[in-house]
Image: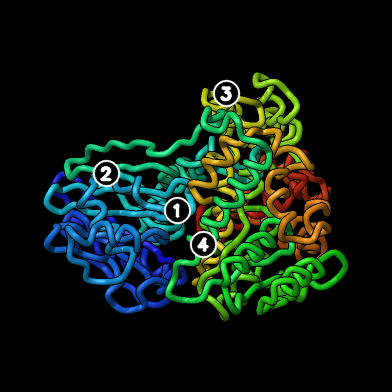
Amino acid sequence: MCGIAGEITFSSGRADPDAVERMSAVLEPRGPDSGGSWDGGWVALGHRRLKVIDLSDGGAQPMVDEDLGLALVFNGCIYNHRELRRELEPHYRFTSQSDTDVVLKAYHRWGEDFVHHLVGMFAIVLVDIAARRVVLARDRLGIKPLYLAQSRGRLRFASTLPALLAAGDVDTELDAAAVAHYLTLHSIVPAPTTLLRGVRKLPAATVRVLEADGRQREHVYWSPSYERDPRHADWTREDWREAVRDALRTAVRRRLVADVPVGVLLSGGLDSSLLVALLAEEGVQDLQTFSTGFSGPGGDEFEYSDQVADAYGTHHHRLPIPPEELLPALPDAVRAMTEPMSSHDVAAFFLLSRVVSEHVRVVQSGQGADEVFAGYRYHQPAATVEREQALPVFADAFADRSPGDLARALMPSRLLESDVTGELLADAIDRPGAASALDAVLRADTHLLMIDDPVKRVDSMTTAWGLEARVPFLDQDLVELAAACPPELKADQGGKGILKDVARAVLPAPLIDRPKGYFPVPLLAQLEGPVLELARDAVTAPEARARGLFRPEYIDELVEHPRDVLPGSKGSELWQVAVLELWLQLHGIR
């Protein structure tokens, strides 16, 4: 896990190393072990390092191979780096045991097709010095972020949006389409958009090539089909169960690749419990597991995580969080968000990551299972309708606000004439390549929405404390297999049916069949006392009034009725708006 930053100039410009240094300084929590920089004239690179693979200085970045004429900064982990090294060793001399070194050689060997050989999570910026070309690449599921700020004659990049702000000269005017997405899609702003007009995200599974004269081109290199594969035509339910189990075993095994111990965030739910069971099958010894919760009724699920820890003999850490710790941590948690996220469990992840980072540097986590295997309540309606009904059924079950609701909330100057969020969903769900309504919804969930919700949430909160989170359920081969799986096998048993079939061989039935739980954060769920005051202060602050984003009468209504919930997410309407305002204020955005 690392933080990367840099500046690329065009048409004979010269990059600003000082701006890169300012960005790198903001990224220090992502990479607390060391930092480095490289000045290539028209390109400058910065890096912050968390030592996970090749703990020696040989793995330091930016990594420059003078013989090959390449320079690189890279955030993430290539799980098959040892296999690739063996394939490349007859052709190249390696100077370290790091996966970074492998990425350099892979690009030299295969050019832009190098991404097809990489199994892992990554944000890569590679400078081809001789060709005067820069290649940007992001992993298939967008697990590692890459933010971009382009202005005339220059492109800056960084692992977080606040790092770009530190460099200066960013257009911080709010993007009207992004605001609509945020308020409609559970605070999700899908790539390439961000809330700021001057900042964009490189989409997942994308390679972008920049030439020194300013020309750019990009392509999507991976897009799994959500239709039935003829090769699986005669598969039974048992065949699918075995295939999913084997793919998940491989995914878990891949994410053990590290030169430091790997733990597990164990909530006691199906997904994280299944990871622990499969790691035990792999023979992992002295596995450290971590569970958290808040004191008081309904504030934790320790009884379930304890069952799993006891069954598999893990070195288990119960990490209860006193309620009084939440309020002081909330501003820091919001500040650590690379973009505002109003899900209640963001602050809990922030506090959990702080404590877990004192024990391990790498953890496996269960994020992504619900999106890939149809685990959410809003997936169920899509399982029972025809393909052409996918869009209205999904929008009705998921959307927090209608266009009319936005018109009642936002100032007229902040409204767009078209329903941009509806158009975004229509493009994602109606395009070809998904056989059924549920296939279309899961594709949109996995490849459009999830990346900028749970994936971004886990990355932001863990890296704030120098902790690397790995997500086996987002293994590329597992996702491809699940996409081809008949939707009825995923939707049955209340959702995640085929995954529950896998779990029945290794987990107690009560853990599998209990109602789906969510990370309980009582103070945010109830929104009362000091937390309510914080939210009210944020939306009524002078900065908020001066911004002119929301209608004053709408804010007055939120303050008067603070416990109103959004119809889609069932989250607090006030808290969603408060997090947006608090994030903007904490980052000095006027």
Judged left or right of residue 274, residue 202 is: left
Q: Nearer the viewer, residue 470 or 476?
A: 476
Crowding near the residue tagged with mark 1, few <14, some 14–19, many ≥20 C-alpha atoms within 10 Å? many
Q: Which one is nearer the viewer's eye here, 549 or 346?
A: 346
CA–CA distance in space, label 2 to label 3? 30 Å
| Mark 4 residue crowding within 10 angstroms, few (<14) / some (14–19) / many (20+) | some
Residue 544 image position (x, y, % from top left): 62, 51
Q: Which is more N-terminal, label 2 or label 4?
A: 2
Residue labelled with disc 4: 253
- Residue drawn 36% across the image and 66% down it: 24
Which mark is first along the chain, 3 or 2?
A: 2
User: What kind of element bears circle 3?
Assistant: helix
- Foreground tag (3 vs 1): 3
Q: Which residue is mark 3?
A: 430
Q: Is 504 rendered above or below residue 2?
A: above
Judging by the rendered image, the residue that carries numbered circle 2 is: 112
Q: Name the residue tied to disc 1.
A: 145
380 sits left or right of 42 in the view: right
Question: Which amino acid type corresponds to the residue marked 2 in the rendered image?
Answer: Glu
Q: Amino acid at mark 1?
A: Pro
Q: Nearer the viewer, mark 4 or mark 2?
A: 4
Looking at the image, can residue 473 be seen? Answer: yes
| Depicted 130 relative to depicted 231: above or below | below
Tell me the CA gap for discs 1 and 4: 24 Å
Q: CA distance from mark 4 to mark 3?
A: 36 Å
| Disc with the residue nearer the chain's start (1 vs 4) | 1
Determine whether the residue tagged by mark 2 lies in a helix, strand or loop: helix
Amino acid on which the number 4 mark rests in the picture? Arg
Q: What percent of the width, then of the height, locates residue 310?
A: 75, 74
Residue 286, above or below 559: below
